[in-house]
Amino acid sequence: MAASLDWTRGFSLDFSLQNGRSQGVEATARRLSQMGDMYFDTAAAQAAIQNEDPLIYEFYELGAPQSAGDLAFGTSIIYAGKVGDEYYMTKGHFHTILDTSEVYYCMAGKGAMLTESPEGDTILHELTPGQALYVPPRYAHRSINTGKETLVTFFVFRGDAGHDYGTIETKGYRKLLVERDGKPTLIDNPRWR
Ligand code: ZN
């Protein structure tokens, strides 16, 4: 973490439009082995972990104060690839304070944001460069790279919102985005519980 992030008096930070990277601040990496059994094709996931344990995504968490008046922000960088026929994606999460929202801005690449309410309302939003996306309160959100280039988004959410990964880890999403006949296709998750 760079020492120059002054959350009391303010700061500015450069994120590359091309790859979402920032000088002097470290990104957090997520490899396939760190994603539990989130991918539907567990055999393909195990084989990939044995082989090279691919880097699926990275993100910048800048250590924003966890208060309602602060805004946490950063970039998320999702690499291109698939596990079986399921695209590389983030774990996805609800916010611990469920009633908080988030804004995403797509800087590079091509993909989708899969959002899902606890009641099962599922919406797939497209992500293309220049597009801003509002994830309303109560909806889990997961970024998915459906393209051939790295997908880069900038995000902002309330500082105290918190991340609830556990619900997705145990229940999964109701829907999965997989490639069928060369196209992204939303299917029911047979393992959802
Ligand atoms: Zn979020």
Image: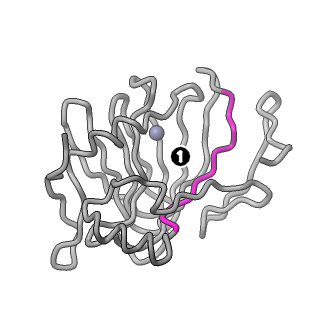
* Above/below status of 191 relative to 186: above
According to the picture, the residue beneath numbered tag 1 turns out to be: 155
Residue stretch in magenta: 55-65
75 on left or right of 96: right
Viewer-side residue, 72 vs 12: 72
Residue at the (58%, 54%) spot, across then down = 59
Residue 182's spot in the image, x, y percent? 21, 79
Q: How many badges with numbers are in the image? A: 1
62 in the magenta segment: yes
Q: Is the distance from the Cβ of mark 1 to the nearest ligand 1 atom less than 8 Å?
A: yes
Residue at the (34%, 35%) spot, across then down = 167
Residue at the (85%, 44%) spot, across then down = 4
Residue 1's spot in the image, x, y percent? 77, 47
78 in the magenta segment: no
Residue at the (57%, 25%) spot, across then down = 160
Q: Amino acid at mark 1?
A: Phe
Could you tell me which secondary element the residue under label 1 belongs to? strand
Residue 174's spot in the image, x, y percent? 20, 45
